Amino acid sequence: MTAPPRAPLLLTPGPLTTGRQTREAMLRDYGSRDRDFIALNAGVLARLTALVGGGETHACVPVQGSGTFAVEAAIGTLVPRGGKLLILENGAYGARMARICEIIGRDCDVLQWPENEPVSTAEIGKALLNDGTITHVAVVHCETTSGILNPLEEIAEVVSKHDRGLLIDAMSSFGALPLDVEGLPCEALMASSNKCLEGVPGMGFVIARKSALEAAQGNAHSLSLDLNDQWQVMEKTGQWRFTPPTHVLAALASALDQHQTEGGVKGRGKRYGENWRLLVDGMRELGFQTLLGDDLQAPIIVTFLTPADPKYDFEAFYKGLAGKGFVIYPGKLTQADSFRIGCIGQVRPQDMRDLMAAVKAVLDEMGVTSAAP
Ligand SMILES: *Cc1c(COP(=O)(O)O)cnc(C)c1O
């Protein structure tokens, strides 16, 4: 019998390639009221909170669904109906938060920066000074649109100085880059099971200040996305309000064990940093240019500008790489023509070396002599 072909490596912003051990953890069915499941669930939530130093002050409230469900739940629950959210936007995920506000009926203002520039703090202070009705500020830590890293500490300092609540979309950084809810400080941080934690998709979560969760009763626009209610019921019964993604939780428990074995946030960040370095250096050697300078870039996902050579074609490039076992991702930029390659998931430095050989081979097949934009 021949071995099944290896699934292609997902070099995307999620879902990602997961470890076999993580997938095997899903072989057991748990009932939602099962004592083993209740203990497993409580352990996962406590570990997630501890990863960002929120043990006493913050609680982790999970929601069924993808990361966007957690973002929508956080905005809808924590920003009161009469409140106002200031969104700091330099990419698609910031823009999505504005769309959420529009749909669920939360007042918002958007401060915008180009996709290749980090959010800058001077304008935030001015906006908060000028508009006393703003109750909360939202920002994306690593804007996965481009891969840019926003200066979280400086942003948190300004927001805290003006005494507003900060909501952080840490979807693509949680577990790989250091975050500290107390040190920042922040009111809530949103993330999901399937990015740098390397779990399977299906669960979003919000690590929120307990005092803010308590004050949020009756705010939510939605029954299923009401974090206050989900939290209260879970505190009382240990159970989710509606069918929990039991297999996702089991996989995440295993993924968290592996995260710890790898050296926690530091170890995970180190491997991604090595992947990133090999990727960027290798691609530059072939003539590719990155959208961002290394100083602005998170070691999570990298945006490359489309080569100018008329023989280059993204569809052919994509298919060629997929045929060699690597799935990359189209660009999501509104301005520059580009594509993206992720550094996260169960991807190791040797995979990046193999990828470089595959990229070179596919360019050769297309007859592209220079990948310069
Ligand atoms: C992945 C991601 C999300 C959530 O996207 P889903 O497709 O709903 O999981 C939100 N924000 C950022 C920055 C992300 O990278």
Image (spheres, rainbow, N blue to C red):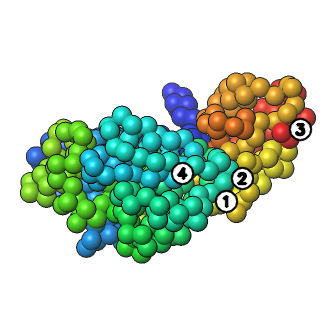
Helix, strand, or loop for circle 4?
strand
Q: Which mark is residue 111?
A: 4
Provide the residue designation for mark 3: 370
- The reply to whether the C-beta atoms of the residues labelled 1 and 2 are less than 8 Å apart is yes
> Label 3 sits on what residue type?
Ser
Residue at 34% across, 43% down: 106
Label whose residue precedes the other's in the sequence (3 or 4): 4
The reply to whether dot 3 and dot 2 touch (C-beta < 8 Å) is no
**Residue corresponding to mark 1:** 296
Residue behind label 3 places its C-beta within 8 angstroms of ligand 1: no
Between disc 2 and disc 4, the foreground one is 4
Q: Amino acid at mark 4?
A: Leu
State the image coordinates of residue 91 (x, y, percent, origin top left). 57, 45
* Inter-mark Cα distance, 1 to 4: 19 Å
Residue ID at (86%, 26%): 310
Q: CA distance from mark 3 to mark 1?
A: 25 Å
Q: Earlier in the sequence, mark 1 or mark 4?
A: 4
Q: Secondary structure at mark 1?
A: helix
Residue wearing tag 2:
292
* Of callouts 3 and 1, the N-terminal one: 1
Badge 4 crowding class, 10 Å Cα cut-off, few under 14, some 14 to 19, many 20 or more, is some
